Amino acid sequence: MPGGSDFSLANLPYGVFRRSRQPPKVGVAIGEQVLDLAEVARAGLFDDVVDGGETLFRADRLNPFMARGRRTWDAVRTRLTELLDATDHRLRDIDGLAERALVPATQVELQLPFEVADYVDFYASIEHATNLGRMFRPGGEPLLPNWRHLPVGYHGRAGTVVVSGTPIVRPNGQRKLGDTEAPTFCPSRMLDFEAEVGFVVGSGSRLGSTVATDDVAEHVFGLVLVNDWSARDIQAWEYQPLGPFLGKSFATSVSPWVVALAALEPFRVPSPVQDPPVLEYLRTTGDWGLALDLEVRLTSAAMGRRGSRPVVLSRPPFAGLYWTIPQMLAHATINGASLRTGDLFASGTVSGTAPDTLGSLIELADRGRVPLALPDGSTRTFLEDGDTVEISAACAAPGFPRVGFGAVSGTVLPTHRA
Ligand code: CA
């Protein structure tokens, strides 16, 4: 990945942070620091751009700010750019404000940035859907007949979305190994990660209305990284006919910084050609692919003890995703389902075509057939207790500062006894 900070002036992602013994507040990441927006509001610097700024930012979640809508998001972003611009650092014009409002990132604890309203997970990568189709339904057509006509998804569990750094306890569940064997109950032995990108709804919509692909920027506040932890053995036994359930719902991790949609403008690229052509309500104008490259890294417990660097497992390219964000949002509302502030929509596993661009371990190790070798001498087909999975991502385009997402990470802990 190219160098430079994830959090330049071109980025300005939002999060919720705490300093020791202080209540949580809304902040913006800038370089190696966090800007305390409540302090900025208290100094009156948001008075002309947002009503009640201090209350809005002295909050333990982004939801109240996100609910204000596009005009407020844009006005605050413009003001933040003015305040932090290195050549005209207006924050320094007020005595002591820069010192009060800029906190070293090492001194804060980052929380779940927004209260998750509803959570939907799509299946938007044709490479991932094809690979999984081959494994779960060997001998059949890998893609089901609906796949190229609509973005397939399912409703997940909002209450188990956790912030990066939260430990992931290995789930127990039912599995069934062969056609003739009886189901058994045990800790999952096929625990996996899924490298995904999520988008977060700021402005909701009315029940019975629909959101057109052209209106996506009015509703989507920003993007986060998602790790959709998956227990493949539980999933394989339970998923037909109603879709994923307990094999997914035990935990979903998100990155602590929400990158504003506005920060991603320079990185929009054409998305893949869709064949057959989609129905009218899924048609889009403009480029909705995103030049965003993910990186998945793993550190085993033994590597951690030795201080070894994480091993890079994969670099999935988000730009190749078959279904785009406006299509996913338009599809999710075409039946009149309303959007709520805090709704999280994840892309589904991002996989490319090359072997080192696959976004899950089941694909990377070909469902256990090709174990991955780790620097500590062990191998992996699925995750072991003590493994830490970290996913980072950054947008790059010639002539623009890179816009990074930070990372989402989680360590697998041994199962609780049922
Ligand atoms: Ca998923």
Image (spheres, helix red, strand yellow):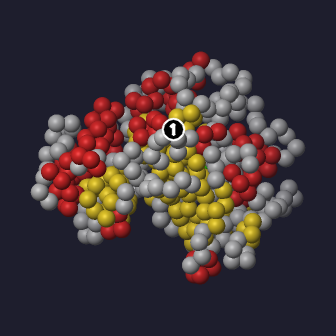
Residue 311: x percent and y percent?
A: 64, 67
Secondary structure type for disc 1: helix
Location of residue 289 (image quadrant): top right
Identify residue for label 1. Answer: 267
- Taking the spot 59% from the left edge, 81% from the top edge, the residue there is 306
In this rendering, the answer to whether 311 lies above or below 285 is below
Q: Label 1 is placed on what type of residue?
A: Phe
In this rendering, the answer to whether 99 lies above or below 55 is below
Residue 131 or 117: which is nearer the viewer? Answer: 131
Location of residue 215 (image quadrant): top left
- Taking the spot 70% from the left edge, 33% from the top edge, the residue there is 147
Disc 1 C-beta below 8 A from ligand 1: no
Residue 106 or 50: which is nearer the viewer? Answer: 106
- Taking the spot 20% from the left edge, 47% from the top edge, the residue there is 90
Location of residue 20 (image quadrant): bottom left
Instruction: Single out the residue that lies furthest toward the left.
Output: 95
Residue 239 visible in the picture: yes
Residue 240 visible in the picture: no
Q: Quadrant of the C terminus?
A: bottom right
Residue 237: x percent and y percent?
A: 73, 54
Name the side, left or right, on which 8 lies relative to 189: left
